[in-house]
Amino acid sequence: MRAKILYVTDLTYPANGRRYGDEDAYLTRQLREHFDLALCHPLDATALMDSFDAVVVRNSGPVIHQQTEYDEFRAAAIAQGTRVFTQLTGKADMIGKQYLVDLSDAGYPVIPTTDSDPAKLPEAISYVVKPKLGSDSIGLRKVSRDELTHLSLDGQLAQPLIDFRYEVSFYFIDRDLQYALYAPDPAKRWELERYEPTDDDRAFAQRFVDWNTIDHGIQRVDACRTAAGELLLVELEDLNPFLSLELTDDTTRSRFVTRMAKSLTDLLAL
């Protein structure tokens, strides 16, 4: 008997520069060759998940819009031992952005970040302040150094506005890099092109995936290339990262689906 998968997605969410419905239509069409699969809206996942062998959380939109319902889903899934892909053991975006502060304090190559002391941040023309629980730049604002020193950062974090050459994303299943894409124009985040990572690039991205406590699931490591040439982490998206699969070639897409199906099968065997 084939495993039954509940695939959680919001096909109609109006994501800027991304087509959630197209990506998930492709993935579910391919995954049906391996599993019995049903789609549901994220608001229905808690009520339906008991009837399935595993839950796949994909393009379900920013959790901030449904924080209470997501918290209920997460608590119920953990309490019941529900198999969730990506696993709910992650330490990055799936539980907020506190990890950016922690990684910065620990000396990892991330954009310098604080949630308490602006004096820790390097001098910059301006700074970004954003909520720890947020995504898609919701609640983000730019401030001066003087404004920052007079702000309460309760529930927020602050970073210097980095002068970078481009952003690059590394897409992983489990701990294995599948492909990379980059945005040559810093002003156009979702106009991506294929990117061939160097050995140093791979090691940079791998370090964050290995730091995270996820064995089965999808992660996207977002980084920026500074004017000095170094990579700095922007975000480790371990909840529902958009994959931009339409920008990859047929071989890469096919390999990605095969690897995703294997990871799901391994998760079901736990």
Image: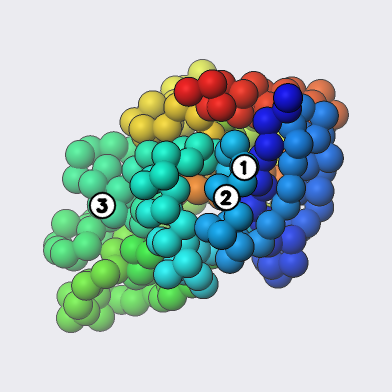
Local SS, label 3? helix
Please give the name of the residue rendered at 68% of the width and 37% of the height, measured from the top-left corner: 4
Query: In the image, 63: left or right of 121?
Result: right
On the image, numbered disc 1 is attached to which residue? 52
Residue holding disc 2? 49
Judged left or right of residue 237, residue 6 is right
Q: Is residue 216 left or right of residue 98?
A: right
Q: Is residue 124 visible?
A: no
How packed is label 2: few (under 14 Cα within 10 Å), some, or many (20 or more)? many
- Please name the colour scheme applied to the rendered image: rainbow
Residue at 48% across / 41% down in the picture? 82
Residue in front for this viewpoint, 208 or 216: 216
**Residue toward you, 85 or 72:** 72
Residue 179 position, x and y percent, is 65, 29
Q: CA distance from mark 1 to mark 3?
A: 37 Å
Residue 196 x %, y %: 65, 27
What type is the residue that disc 1 sits on?
Phe
Q: Residue at x 58, y 38 (%)?
A: 54
Which of the two labelled residues, at mark 1 and mark 3, occupies the earlier sequence position?
Answer: 1
Q: Residues within 10 Å of mark 3 (few under 14, many from 20)?
A: many
Check disc 3 and report the residue beneath it.
101
Q: Earlier in the sequence, mark 2 or mark 3?
A: 2
Q: Are marks 2 and 1 in contact (CB under 8 Å)?
A: yes
User: Residue 182 sits in which quadrant?
Assistant: top right
Residue 44 visible to the viewer: yes
Q: Amino acid at mark 3?
A: Val
Foreground residue among 80 and 111: 80
Quadrant in the picture for residue 168:
top right
Residue 216, position as x, y percentages in the image? 51, 29
Q: Which mark is residue 125?
A: none
